[in-house]
């Protein structure tokens, strides 16, 4: 793989072709906030908190750093008025669902986000999909997935699989950026609904 | 049917089909597109068949069930050949007369003709009806001439001659050049040049490439692609095969939504026929080009019309968009180069090949060539499908083709581009229809939905309607789209319910900006357009709702009241009897009063109050006057009172 030189926040950064901006920045010790990113998982691009400004072929655009592949002579700005404005608004939108999440609160302080800007709808979940993707991509169990779409989207365990797999795993719990008990809560919900194979599964 | 092995054999077959057809033989063509079917076209067909049988004319008259010619407002549409007499709003009861009068006695039935509401003149032929006269129907013009289930009908009209030309006389590069030269832009919404997309896909590394027809049309009120796929499926298929040849693809998909059963049926039949005749499969028309097509039925998600989501759905996964920093033309279905175009884009290809890019570029504007099909709906006299040359003004589409606004109401705005588009006001009506002009005006061409709105339409409510649609139809994956839409909808709902606050407009603008800048796919990035364009052109309406709690269009129920003016009420009992919730009190000779608690604001009283009285008033932003005393409600009538 050939090496590419790009510029991030005014600094010359070397990266390998095929890397994302996020990876290149991390390699150079430049931090870009993320919420749905995990190094063991395929980039997902859902939380958009890693949005950065790029300049390429004379055009400026806003892209997700976790997904955008590095290019030769790419100019990246990880902070700008526009970027900060977007991050602040995204945090405010997420804080309406998970107002007490420490990770969100830390970022809120950094970007001046007001957790009370929008009416609270505490679901404790920002649908980052870390649990869902970890279960599918790393554990290859697919015990948890998304249901419904649009504003009704939520995470849900599939009782048939969860009853069999989750007791001895629970590796998704600590991945949650908002509330470590969130997945546990949804899991309990899924398993306490009367389901015949629950008994069989729990005996293992 | 033995396979056709060369262009010469195709021409021979075409000649033999034509020789068996007598151009003077009467033929009754009945539109059996989805619109006319809903109006009972099937019964018209049955009735006509019975009449034909009754008169023993089975072998002397053809009956053809065709696709949609576009004039849905006046369905069921029937055209009688060879004279091309056009009958509108045909009912099964008219069948007897059509056969005895028009077929046997060669007489035109006056009452089934189009009457120009302005001049009172009748039009016998399609070409004389203003709705058709002002169109340029290159793509849908054939719909009424062919049975979509008959490949012979398509061949009789010159079908697959473009494919034959391509395979026998042109290299893939030449086809690509011709399409590039035509400057054909994608009809699905974005208007990306098709030739450039094809070229990128053709040049992308890899052996396997896919071509795809996007027939996941989902904008509210849009049905252009349905009419094409239902009415002339072979034209789309021919375009696709030509594209596959140019791109170097041997496998294609037609992604059509399950909610279009007739389109699924007709295109499936068309594929089977094309395979039998040798337009699909191996060694097409004796060349060394192989190509096969599969139909993939969508499961009802608007977002699956987005190209990367559609490709994910074809892979068998949930139709969620992927970021397109690497184009789908390079990495699409199963990460293979994939070229996706909309139904209408593909249907243009055989035309361009047959008539040449030079001919095509003579139609339209500098940046937008050819024609565009719109589904003209809403508050307009002639609703239906219209195909117009690019560059025609919106005013001509709405007034000349569409026949203007019904019931003498005032035009307010036209919404183009579906949920990703925007509302264009009166001042901009002379704007030419063109990809770039519409975008400049804050809307977009989109796939071709055109919703006309009159003075009774509340623009805040329109924005709310589209956001509500997107609330269900966003995939929900990324935060700015899912949460931005959620919050914008909440604010808009509050405004329409009289709970708007100072600062709401600014907050909407801020949310719109984030949704636009940070969303993952085009659905999110354009989701705020209905909000932004209505704020831009109709800010005063937003302000009236927020500051005066007034809906200028008298549309938002929570902001309006109906009130009977005691000085005008003649106690005629009409509104009282028609009120569906019994909210009107009064009697003969007793002035009527609306119980505001019971009133559901359906507007019936306002509609039925005789114009000469005009006693029912709509109020908004002002209090309902207190009821008058019981004594004052008694009407003492002069002559009638004894």
Image (cartoon, coloured by chain):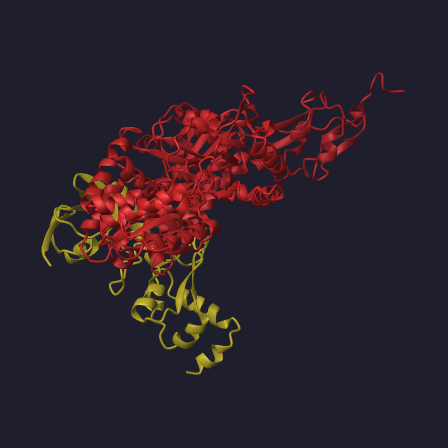
Q: A17 or B259, which lies in front?
A: B259
Q: How many marks?
A: 0
Which chain can be seen in yellow? A
- Residue B604 visible in the displayed image: yes
x and y percent of residue B126 in the render?
48, 29
Is the C terminus of chain B in the top left, top right, bottom left or bottom right quadrant? top right
Query: Residue B111 sits in which quadrant?
Result: top right
x and y percent of residue B428 in the render?
39, 25
Query: Residue B316 sits in which quadrant?
Result: bottom left
x and y percent of residue B636 in the render?
83, 20
- Residue B343 visible in the displayed image: no
Q: Residue at x 40, y 36 (%)?
A: B373
Query: Residue B639 sits in which quadrant?
Result: top right
Q: B372 or B537, which lies in front?
A: B372
Q: B17 or B88, which lies in front?
A: B17
Q: Residue at x 62, y 36 (%)?
A: B94
x and y percent of residue B164 in the render?
27, 45
In this picture, residue A66 sits left or right of residue B235: left
In this picture, residue B191 sits left or right of residue B114: left
In this picture, residue A133 sits left or right of residue B226: left
Is the N terminus of chain B in the top left, top right, bottom left or bottom right quadrant? bottom left
Question: Residue extending furthest bottom?
Answer: A203
Q: B111 or A36, which lies in front?
A: B111
Q: Residue at x 45, y 27 (%)?
A: B127
Question: Residue extending furthest right?
Answer: B642
| Colour of chain B in the rendered structure image | red
Question: Residue extending furthest top?
Answer: B639
């Amino acid at each position: 793989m050939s090496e590419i030189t790009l510029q991030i926040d005014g600094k010359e950064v070397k990266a390998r072709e095929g890397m994302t901006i996020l990876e290149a920045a991390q390699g150079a010790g430049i931090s870009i906030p993320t919420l749905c990113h995990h190094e063991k998982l395929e980039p997902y691009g859902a939380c958009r908190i890693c949005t950065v400004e790029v300049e390429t072929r004379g055009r400026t655009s806003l892209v997700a750093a976790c997904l955008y592949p590095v290019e030769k002579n790419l100019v990246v700005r990880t902070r700008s008025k526009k970027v900060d404005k977007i991050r602040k608004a995204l945090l405010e939108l997420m804080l309406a669902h998970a107002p007490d999440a420490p990770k969100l609160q830390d970022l809120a302080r950094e970007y001046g986000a007001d957790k009370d800007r929008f009416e609270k709808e505490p679901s404790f979940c920002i649908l980052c999909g870390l649990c869902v993707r970890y279960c599918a991509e790393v554990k290859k169990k697919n015990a948890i997935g998304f249901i419904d779409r649009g504003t009704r989207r939520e995470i849900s365990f599939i009782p048939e699989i969860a009853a069999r797999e989750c007791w001895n795993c629970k590796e998704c719990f600590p991945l949650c950026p908002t509330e470590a008990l969130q997945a546990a809560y949804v899991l309990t919900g899924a398993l306490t609904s009367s389901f015949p194979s629950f008994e069989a599964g729990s005996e293992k | 049917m033995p396979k056709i092995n060369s262009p010469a054999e195709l021409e021979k077959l075409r000649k033999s089909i034509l020789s068996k057809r007598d151009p003077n033989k009467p033929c009754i063509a009945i539109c059996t597109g989805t619109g006319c079917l809903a109006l009972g076209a099937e019964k018209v067909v049955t009735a006509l068949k019975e009449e034909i049988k009754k008169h023993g004319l089975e072998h002397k008259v053809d009956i053809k069930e065709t696709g949609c010619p576009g004039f849905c407002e006046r369905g069921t549409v029937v055209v009688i050949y060879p004279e091309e007499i056009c009958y509108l709003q045909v009912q099964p009861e008219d069948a007897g007369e059509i056969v005895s009068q028009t077929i046997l006695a060669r007489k035109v039935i006056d009452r089934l003709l189009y009457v120009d509401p302005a001049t009172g003149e009748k039009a016998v032929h399609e070409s004389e009806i203003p709705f058709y006269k002002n169109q340029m129907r290159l793509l849908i013009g054939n719909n009424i001439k062919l049975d979509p289930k008959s490949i012979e009908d398509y061949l009789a009209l010159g079908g697959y001659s473009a494919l034959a030309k391509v395979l026998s006389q042109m290299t893939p590069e030449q086809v690509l050049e011709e399409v590039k030269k035509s400057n054909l832009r994608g009809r699905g919404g974005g208007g990306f040049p098709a030739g450039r997309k094809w070229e990128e896909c053709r040049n992308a590394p890899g052996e396997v490439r896919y071509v795809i027809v996007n027939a996941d049309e989902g904008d509210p009120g849009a049905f252009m692609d349905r009419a094409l796929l239902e009415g002339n499926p072979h034209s789309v298929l021919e375009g696709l095969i030509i594209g596959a040849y140019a791109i170097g693809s041997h496998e294609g998909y037609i992604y059509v939504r399950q909610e279009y059963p007739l389109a699924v049926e007709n295109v499936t039949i068309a594929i089977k026929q094309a395979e039998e005749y040798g337009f699909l499969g191996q060694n097409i028309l004796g060349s060394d080009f192989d190509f096969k097509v599969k139909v993939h039925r969508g499961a009802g998600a608007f977002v699956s019309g987005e190209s990367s989501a559609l490709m994910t759905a074809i892979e068998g996964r949930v139709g969620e968009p992927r970021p397109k920093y690497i184009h789908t033309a390079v990495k699409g279905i199963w990460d293979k180069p994939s070229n996706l175009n909309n139904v209408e884009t593909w249907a243009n290809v055989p035309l361009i090949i047959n008539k040449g890019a030079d001919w095509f570029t003579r139609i339209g504007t500098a940046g937008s060539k050819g024609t565009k099909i719109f589904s003209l709906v809403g508050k307009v006299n002639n609703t239906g499908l219209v195909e117009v040359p690019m560059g025609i003004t919106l005013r001509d589409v709405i007034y000349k083709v569409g026949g203007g606004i019904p019931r003498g109401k005032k035009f307010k705005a036209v919404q183009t581009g579906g949920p990703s588009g925007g509302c264009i006001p009166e001042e901009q009506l002379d704007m030419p229809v063109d990809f770039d002009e519409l975008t400049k005006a804050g809307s977009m061409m989109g796939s071709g939905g055109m919703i006309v709105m009159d003075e009774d339409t509340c623009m805040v409510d329109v924005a709310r309607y589209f956001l509500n649609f997107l609330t269900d139809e966003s995939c929900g994956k990324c935060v700015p789209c899912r949460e931005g839409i959620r919050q914008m909808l909440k604010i808009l709902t509050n405004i329409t319910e009289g709970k708007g606050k100072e600062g709401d407009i600014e907050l909407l603008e801020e949310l719109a900006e984030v949704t636009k800048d940070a969303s993952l796919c085009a659905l999110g990035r354009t989701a705020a357009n209905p909000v932004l364009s209505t704020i831009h052109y109709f800010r005063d309406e937003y302000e009236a709702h927020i500051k005066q709690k007034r809906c200028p269009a008298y549309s938002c129920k929570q902001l309006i009241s109906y009130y009977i003016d005691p000085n005008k009420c003649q106690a005629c009992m009409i509104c009282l009897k028609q009120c569906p919730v019994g909210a009107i009190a009064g009697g003969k000779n007793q002035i009527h009063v609306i119980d505001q608690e019971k009133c559901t604001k359906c507007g019936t009283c306002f509609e039925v109050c005789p114009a000469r009285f005009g006693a029912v008033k709509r109020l908004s932003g002002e209090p309902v006057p207190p009821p008058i005393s019981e004594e004052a409600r008694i009407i003492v009538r002069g002559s009638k009172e004894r």
